[in-house]
């Protein structure tokens, strides 16, 4: 994330603006629409069930501080502010991209494993005994 580069250079205003932009790019990517304000994009994803209420709150915090950073007459972005919204943006991105992918891969892995399982035959006479077919009783 470019915001990390800005943070490491102590360009906290730039970090905030880029973290905000990362949230907006993710919203657009997840179907929020390009022509809307970020506030509406975030709320739209929440309304569609794409993000949780917590993620919505995190995204709005990033948006507020990012908006402040983008305007010269707004308050300064302190190091702690930049650090916090960078973390919030990163967690937001993990929650909507990384975590679902991990869950999807593990689900596929489990299904594949379950499909390949065959019922196991138990040996007669203990674990070292050979398998013997059941013979019907003589009539």
Image (tube, grey):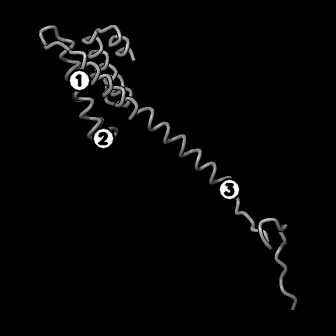
State how far apart marks 1 and 3 are (Cα): 49 Å
Label 2: element kind: loop
Read off the residue under disc 2. 52
| Residue at x 23% of width, y 34% of height | 57
Q: Quadrant of residue 26?
A: top left
The residue at 82%/76% (across/down) is 134
Spot occupied by residue 113 in the image (x, y as percentages of width and height): 63, 50
Q: Are marks 2 and 3 in contact (CB under 8 Å)?
A: no
| Residue to which mark 1 is pinned | 63
Q: Earlier in the sequence, mark 1 or mark 2?
A: 2
Quick one: label 2, few (<14), some, or many (20+) residues within 10 Å?
some
Q: Residue at x 17, y 11 (%)?
A: 71
Mark 1 lies on a secondary structure that is helix
SS of the residue under disc 3: loop
| Residue 111 sits above or below residue 98 on the image | below
Q: Residue at x 21, y 14 (%)?
A: 69
């Amino acid at each position: 994330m470019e915001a990390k580069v800005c943070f490491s250079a102590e360009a906290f205003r730039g970090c905030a603006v880029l973290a905000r932009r990362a949230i907006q790019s993710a919203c657009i990517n997840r179907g929020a629409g390009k022509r809307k304000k970020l506030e509406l994009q975030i709320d739209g994803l929440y309304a569609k069930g794409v993000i949780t209420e917590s993620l919505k709150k995190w995204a709005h915090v990033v948006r507020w501080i990012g908006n402040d950073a983008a305007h010269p007459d707004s308050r300064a972005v302190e190091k702690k502010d930049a650090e916090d919204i960078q973390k919030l943006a990163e967690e937001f991105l993990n929650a909507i991209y990384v975590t679902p992918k991990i869950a999807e891969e593990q689900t596929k892995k489990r299904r594949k494993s379950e499909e390949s399982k065959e019922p196991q035959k138990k040996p007669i006479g203990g674990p070292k005994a050979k398998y013997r077919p059941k013979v019907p009783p003589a009539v």
